[in-house]
Image (cartoon, helix red, strand yellow):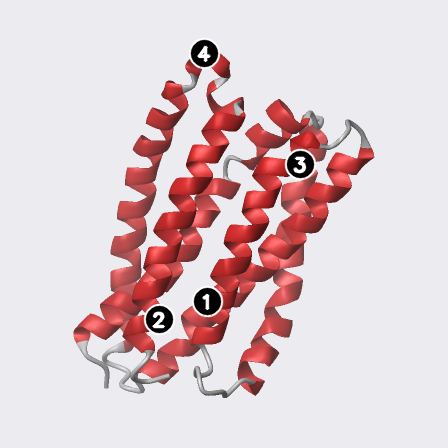
Amino acid sequence: RAKMWEIMMYALNNTSTNTYMVVVGYISYFLIGIVGLASVLAGSIVTIMRVWDGVTDPFVGMMVDKTNGKFGKNRPFMVIGNIILAASSFIMFHFTHKLPEGPARFIFFVVFCCVYYLGYTCQCVVTKSAQSCMTNDPKQRPMFASFDGVFNTILFTVLAIVVANIANKYADVGNYTSTQFFHEFWMMTAIMSAIFTVIAVISIAPKD
């Protein structure tokens, strides 16, 4: 069995990845308004990346099964995944539009988007797998979903308001299609996600 605070705090691992998922929800604004891709092409990238996300799941799951080091089975993927998410999303939002117009921008973005989803998968896979590490009591398992639901409801509600306020700050330079907007959005996301990940790592450390 796990302590209540361990279950509650570990649920923040999923909240951490969902914080980045909010950023991806605005990726079309970036691709169309800043990078200069056609709307159809921008939409295709998002769809293709979701398929790629599904391809990486079994591969990363296999790696988790084979991992059992001094830092545990799950924590390495939580930390590595979050680092990959921060680094790849920073590169996507800060360098793609600086490349010469044409195929180079598209290829550059796709490559780092693939890396981004690899990091996303690393951290997401252990959201479920680590629950069996935390507790084997079937009465405690539903608590993960309960806390997860509460955290994510708060996250999506608060971020919707905060992101809109950030966009309003840059109304004179394009709202959702300004580099300033995406820089501030990325900064907030990276900090929040890192804090949630650290808390989740601490919570599972005694059992992992």
- Please provide percent x and percent y for residue 38: 71, 26
The answer to which of marks 4 and 3 sits earlier in the sequence is: 3
The answer to which of marks 2 and 4 sits earlier in the sequence is: 4
Question: Can you identify the residue that label 3 sits on?
Answer: 96
Task: Give how far apart the Cα atoms at labels 2 and 4 are.
Answer: 41 Å
Query: Which residue sits furthest right?
Result: 103
Instruction: Name the kind of residue labelled 1 in the image.
Output: Val
Instruction: Name the kind of residue labelled 3 in the image.
Output: Thr
Q: Residues within 10 Å of mark 4 (few under 14, many from 20)?
A: few
Q: What element carries label 4?
A: helix
The answer to which of marks 1 and 3 sits earlier in the sequence is: 1
Q: Quadrant of the N terminus?
A: bottom left
As drawn, 58 above or below 149: below
Task: Give how far apart the Cα atoms at labels 1 and 3 are.
Answer: 25 Å
Horizontal placement of 82 versus 93: left or right?
left
Instruction: Name the kind of residue labelled 4 in the image.
Output: Asp
Query: Which residue sits furthest top?
Result: 172
Q: How crowded is mark 2: few (under 14 residues within 10 Å), some or many (20 or more)?
A: many
